Image (cartoon, helix red, strand yellow):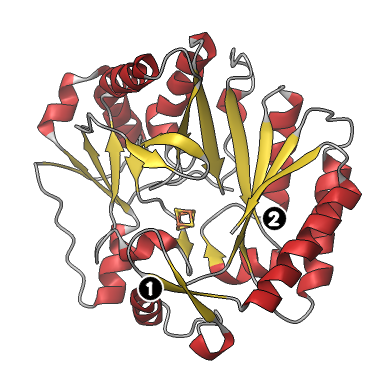
């Protein structure tokens, strides 16, 4: 897919003290992106939908001051951020409820300080291996062309004896990672779904084919590889469509003999998310009918609506079956 070009960029003057900040500014200037210097981001839409759409095209170059990283269960020990928000408009995105009415993209330029915080967390956990997730509040590939920060992280982790990196993306701009030394210390996971779900609900992200092609290139470059199949939804023909997905993955990854991990997440929503989704996507065809769901207590202190036990068991068993039929080297890490 085409690289994301912001329609406006705000720059915190502090970010110009960093090499990456200066580099990012140059990229923005080359792309003719209007630049405004300041410590605040101004987005003025006439409705909440307009605010959302404008915010999703606006970036803010700034500094990440996080010193204590948050835990990141079940996929890693800690999460860190190179950016927040992303240019995608996935209707179900769980970040909708945490990023406010104007989810503009913060792009962090102080990469050496971010890596120093990571190193401290690795040191505190010695002699164990510490796993870091990069992608909990953003899509790190979607904005990589503006900074090159993720590439620096991959190179940092390549040299780290006790640190490992996990990346997750719905984008396909992975060419800058193919020729670098990764030492198998970074695992790329592609968030993938059926063609129907990607086309219907995951606007402004890479297509089904583009993601699978990117996954093949990453596999050929020798990286550890995984897939997050999420959110898994039940709809007419869902079983055929998920089978098509797994068949396609199998044919594209022929010859890749390393372990391939799968993380499986069923579709869920909270009441707050439903309200926001209906405001931002009034014509959404997401199934947000509570009557089709059962309540589950979530780790963030909110009830979420998940599929009833019988249906979620059916999803888990069916997807696990088609994964295992297609891949002898598959490991299903969890279903939730
Ligand atoms: S790409 Fe990921 S982070 Fe971005 S909107 Fe979609 S689900 Fe949310």
- Identify the residue shown where x is 90% and y is 51%: 325
- Identify the residue shown where x is 28% and y is 33%: 108
Q: Of discs 2 and 1, which sits in the foreground? A: 1
Q: Are marks 2 and 1 in contact (CB under 8 Å)?
A: no
Residue 292, position as x, y percentages in the image? 58, 87
Residue 193, position as x, y percentages in the image? 67, 59
- In-image side of 100 versus 197 (left or right): left
- Identify the residue shown where x is 61% and y is 40%: 189
- In-image side of 239 versus 198 (left or right): right
Q: Is residue 17 visible?
A: yes
- In-image side of 14 versus 101 (left or right): left
Does ligand 1 reach within 8 Å of label 1's beta carbon? no
Instruction: Name the residue nearer the viewer: 114 or 61.
Output: 114
In the rendered view of the protein, which quadrant contains the C terminus?
Answer: bottom right
Question: In this rendering, is residue 103 above or below 179?
Answer: below
Q: Secondary structure at mark 2?
A: helix
- Provide the residue designation for mark 2: 208
Residue 258, position as x, y percentages in the image? 79, 27
Residue 107, position as x, y percentages in the image? 30, 38
Does ligand 1 reach within 8 Å of label 2's beta carbon? no
Question: In this rendering, is residue 205 above or below 176?
Answer: below
Label 2 Cα neighbours within 10 Å, binned few <14 / some 14-19 / many ≥20: many
Q: Secondary structure at mark 1?
A: helix
Instruction: Name the residue nearer the viewer: 219 or 49.
Output: 219
Question: Quarter-wise, where is residue 89 in the image?
Answer: bottom left
Residue that extends furthest to the bottom in the rendered view of this protein: 291
- Provide the residue designation for mark 1: 273
Instruction: Name the residue nearer the viewer: 14 or 187.
Output: 187
Q: Which comes before the other along the chain, label 2 or label 1?
A: 2
- In-image side of 310 versus 151 (left or right): right
Label 1 Cα neighbours within 10 Å, binned few <14 / some 14-19 / many ≥20: many
């Amino acid at each position: 897919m085409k690289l994301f070009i912001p329609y406006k960029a705000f720059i915190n003057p502090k970010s110009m003290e960093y090499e990456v900040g200066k580099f990012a500014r140059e990229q923005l200037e080359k792309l003719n992106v209007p630049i405004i210097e300041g410590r605040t981001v101004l987005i003025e839409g006439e409705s909440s939908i307009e605010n959302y759409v404008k915010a999703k095209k606006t970036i803010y170059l700034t500094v990440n001051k996080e010193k204590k990283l948050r835990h990141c269960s079940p996929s890693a020990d800690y999460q860190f951020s190179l950016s927040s928000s992303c240019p995608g408009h996935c209707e179900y995105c769980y970040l909708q409820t945490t990023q406010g009415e104007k989810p503009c993209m913060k792009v962090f330029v102080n990469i050496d300080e971010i890596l120093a915080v990571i190193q401290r967390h690795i040191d505190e956990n010695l002699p164990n291996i510490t796993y870091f997730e990069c992608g909990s509040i953003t899509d790190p590939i979607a904005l990589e062309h503006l900074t090159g920060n993720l590439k620096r992280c991959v190179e940092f982790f390549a040299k780290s004896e006790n640190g490992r990196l996990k990346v997750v993306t719905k984008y396909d701009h992975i060419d800058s990672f193919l020729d670098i030394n990764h030492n198998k210390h970074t695992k790329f996971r592609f968030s993938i779904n059926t063609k129907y779900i990607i086309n219907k609900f995951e606007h402004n992200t890479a297509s089904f084919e583009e993601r699978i092609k990117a996954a093949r290139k990453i596999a050929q470059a020798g990286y550890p590889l995984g897939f997050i199949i999420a959110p898994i939804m039940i709809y007419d023909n869902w079983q055929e469509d998920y089978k098509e997905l797994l068949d396609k993955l199998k044919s594209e990854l022929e010859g890749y003999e390393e372990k391939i991990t799968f993380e499986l997440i069923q579709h869920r929503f909270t009441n707050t998310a439903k309200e926001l989704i209906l405001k931002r996507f009034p014509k959404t065809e997401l199934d947000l009918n509570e009557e089709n769901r059962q309540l589950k207590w979530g780790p963030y202190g909110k009830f979420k609506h998940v599929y009833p036990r019988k249906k979620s068991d059916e999803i888990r068993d069916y997807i696990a079956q088609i994964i295992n039929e297609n891949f002898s080297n598959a490991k299903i890490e969890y279903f939730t």
